[in-house]
Amino acid sequence: MQIDSKRLIKDCATAQAVRAASNHAHRSTGATAIIEPILPLIREFRIQKFSWAAIASALAKQGVVQGGDCQPITARRLTALISAIEKREQRREARLSVRAKRRDLAPIPANPHTFTLSADLRRTEATAVTTTDSEASIRRQEFEDRVRSLLKADSP
């Protein structure tokens, strides 16, 4: 079977762009996907002096398993998963801090799926003042400006 290298490059670039745009560059599976969102709760349990074994046992009772043979999660596996999650976050933060120092790259937005108005579309104080003026006061101001400009032109 022959592989078209140009098509492979194009397909890889497309797939990478789709993954980056979907914000799922690292997709967790299995126990990691379960542990990661409840990590603050697990840390709270540790502050309350619950043992790793007690936390793992409680998770196992709710169906958290490990490995292909679906054994209940153990304290050792739980601590390994938490350590791996923390290391991954530390590496991510280190990459982002290095990236932030580079002047040739645009800053990464905090949430890429939010929209903000352009600076020229935002309201300013002058706009707020003119919206409160009545039509009559605006016409009066224009009239006074025209009279002043005519008087300036006449007086040499």
Image (cartoon, rainbow, N blue to C red):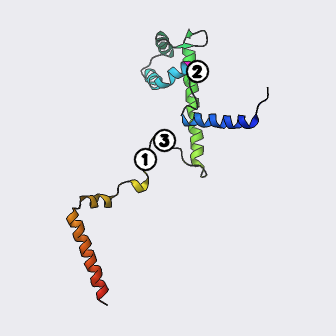
Relative to 104, 152 lies left or right = left
- For label 3, the crowd category at 10 Å Cα-Cα, with few meaning under 14, some 14 to 19 and many 20 or more, is few
Relative to 131, 121 lies left or right = right
Find disc 2 in the rendering and name its residue: 80
Mark closer to the chain start, 3 or 2: 2
Find disc 1 in the rendering and name its residue: 116
The Cα–Cα distance between marks 1 and 3, rounded to whole angstroms, is 12 Å
**In the rendering, at what x and y percent does residue 22 appear?**
54, 34
Q: Amino acid at mark 2?
A: Ala
- Which quarter of the rendering shows the N terminus? top right
Asked where in the image residue 85 lies, by quadrant, the reply is: top right
Mark closer to the chain start, 1 or 3: 3
**In the rendering, at what x and y percent does residue 127 appear?**
32, 59
Q: Amino acid at mark 1?
A: Thr
Mark closer to the chain start, 2 or 1: 2
Q: Is 128 in the magenta?
A: no
Q: Is the residue 39 above or below the residue 98 in the image? A: above
Q: Main secondary structure of the magenta part?
A: loop
Q: Is the residue 32 above or below the residue 144 in the image? A: above
Are the residues flagged by discs 2 and 1 in contact, CB closer than 8 Å? Answer: no
Q: Secondary structure at mark 3?
A: loop
Q: Amino acid at mark 3?
A: Ala
Are the residues flagged by discs 3 and 2 in contact, CB closer than 8 Å? Answer: no
Q: Secondary structure at mark 1?
A: loop
